[in-house]
Every structure is written in C-alpha cells, then in structure tokens.
Amino acid sequence: MEIPFARSERSSVGIEWELALVDADSGDLRQVAETVLEAVAPPGGGQHPAIRQELLLNTVEVVSGVRRTVAEAGADLQRAIDEIRTVTDPLRVELMSAGTHPFARWDNQKVTDQERYATLIDRTQWWGRQMLIYGVHVHVGIEDRDKVLPISNAMLAYYGHLQALSASSPFWGGKETGYASNRALMFQQLPTAGLPFHFQQWSELEHYVQDLTTTGVIDIFDEIRWDLRPSPKFGTLEVRVCDGIPTMQELLATSALTHCLVEYFSSELDAGNPLPDLPPWFAQENKWRSARYGIDSWLILDEQAREDLVTADLTQLLERLAPVAERLGCSEELADVEQIVRYGPSYVRQRRVAEANGGRLDAVVASLVAEMRAGRPVLTTP
C-alpha cells in the first residue's frame, strides 16, 4: 500500500483544542454540541471551518488554520471560542478544558449520531464508552516524507516533558486517581492508540497500514490513534501527547515547545547529525512516570539510561531551543513554559482547589471555567 504524503510548508503549525461544555450552575457536562454546531454552521450548510464535532455531545473542538506561528494559530482558536460563546452564554453553558472532567459520569454521556462514532463504540464497547477525555493535537509541517519517522522517534525522548507540562486529569468520576494524567493511560486502551511503533522507514509504515486494512482493524489511516502520528493528508507530524489544556497561555506554551522541537530535529537532520532514538521500553516507562508523577517525574533521557528530574532537563532544553524559538517567532510563548513549571501544571492547581474547598470537585470545575475565561492560570501562588 502506497501512502502519499502531502506537500506542506516546513514548520507550519496548526492546533486542535477539545473543549468540554459544562453547566454554568452545576458544573456538570451539558449535551449541547449539536445546538452549538447548528448555530455556527455556515449559511449554506456544512461544517464550520474552525468548530468541529467530536465523539461525545458534551464536546466541541476548535481548530486553527495552517499558520506560521503558534500565536497566529492561537488567534484563530480565540475567534472560534468567541463565536461559540455567542451561542453558549445564553444557554448558561461554559467552556472548559482538562484531560478529564473531575466528577462527570461517563455512563451519562451521549455519543454523537454519526456512523464512524457508532462503529467505534460498537467495536470497543466498555472502553470506548469510557473515553470521557479531552486532548490537544499540534500539527507541524514537514517538507520531506523521509524526515517524518526519524523526527517522530526523536520526539519520544521528550514525550514525558510534554505530558508532565500538560497533565490535567487527576480526577475521574469524582475520585482522586493518584495520577497527574489519568487520561494518558485511559486513552491507550483503545485499539491502535498509545505509543507509536518504532518504524524507521516509510515503507514499514505502509506495510503496517496494509496489514491493518486487510485484517479489518482500520478502514482509514486516521483510525490509527497514536500519541505521535504522521498525518499524510496534511503533510505534518501530529503530536497528540497533551491532556486538554485549561488556558490559552499554557496551550501556546506547550505548542511552542512542540513546534520548536520538530523544527530543531528537522535542522539536525539537515546538518547530518544523529537524532535521539530512545528505546521503546524507556519511552513506555517515561509515559507511565509522567502520567503518574507529572512535573515531579524522573525521566530516562537516552539509550544510556541517564535520568534526571523533568524540570531540570526542561531548563537545559529551553536554553537549547531559544534560537529555534526566535526563528519561529515564538520566543514569548516558549518562555511561558517556565511559568507552568513555577506555578504548577493544571493537575497541581486542581488538587490545590479541591483541598482548599474540602474536596468539592464542583469548585475544581469552577476554577477551570474561570481559567478558560481568563486565558491564563488563576491560581498564582506557587
């Protein structure tokens, strides 16, 4: 099976952000996605270019255009959010983003009436119905198909960094899970989800897709739901590591880090330099560690099994990426990664709110709603 890879501008960037629809009074999820999508649909019908349907009726996704900078992509997303609010505000519905809703019950949620979603649920059953989760996807353009898999493999060395920074799902179904990112470990239960296979050549990926198509595992390429996957139709590497991110500031910071890493590795390939190639068993361990411990994780850094605290390695990484950020026009956004480390990712803030309010998770939802409105973390005390 030949899989063509679309032409795209090198290091162009696009962002997809999944948003929960929550009741302004109770904080519980509201099943009003169809109402929102119908209200914002173009006059002639069809799908809004920046506001999309998702698996569950409590969710909408906002999507940027193909942009040069993460700031430009963020401006697209903000325009879409502002348009959504013209519909949701009169309904007393708020927007929220986190890896999971802190207390909503998965078995109360309604699935979008669309054949591909019905097929997914029919096949995956209990695990598919459990997917009450939210994420962020960042696409970065790669101009040469032969670069895609080496860059994807190199990105696995920094998977734990991205997951630790974005971790925002410590609660599930009203319970404290003990994990910074419960979403990360839930999502990998779906067929074809989780860490990518360690392919070196594009022909290996084509053979894999042929096998899965022949045996009926998938019908289309997009049903491969890896945390890092090529997107042949867009000509990008799609980085799907991050939990739902509560604020625009943090979204752009983690997107800038993703953007810079892909461009850095692309430049290293151009210079003939070897890229990181973390053994799959270390990548799997780092995923678990960052999901469990978040910003307090000790990660395995290389094939020699050197380890360091994620925050210490981030400091060195940000210094190394500074010239790349300047070239990509995202120095300010990349610098905000330090603010996430300083004040704590969302899972830290959510736990603080729960503790300060006697364990009440409706207060946690209220804080996430307030942060989405503010565009930045509301809790500013380290």
Image (cartoon, grey):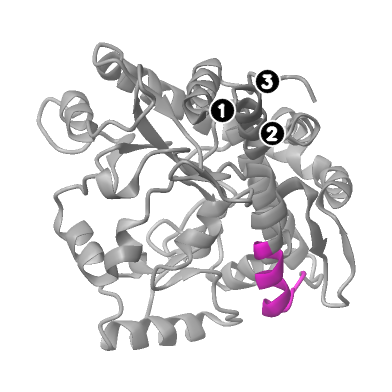
For the N terminus, the image quarter is: bottom left
In the rendered image, the vertical position of residue 158 relative to residue 341, given as above or below: below
User: Which disc is residue 379 wearing?
Assistant: 3
User: Which disc is residue 247 wearing?
Assistant: 1
Residue 377 shown left or right of residue 324 in the figure:
left
Q: Nearer the viewer, mark 3 or mark 2?
A: 3
- Residue at (68% x, 20% y) in the render: 379
Spot occupied by residue 374 in the image (x, y as percentages of width and height): 55, 16
Q: CA distance from mark 2 to mark 1?
A: 17 Å
Q: Secondary structure at mark 3?
A: loop
Magenta stretch, residue numbers: 276-288
Q: Secondary structure at mark 1?
A: loop
User: Which disc is residue 330 wearing?
Assistant: 2
Question: For residue 71, which quarter of the picture?
Answer: top right
Tag 2: residue type? Cys
Which callout, 2 or 1, points at the residue further toward the start of the chain? 1
Spot occupied by residue 345 in the image (x, y as percentages of width and height): 68, 37
Depth check, front residue: 80 or 310: 310
User: Which disc is residue 88 wearing?
Assistant: none
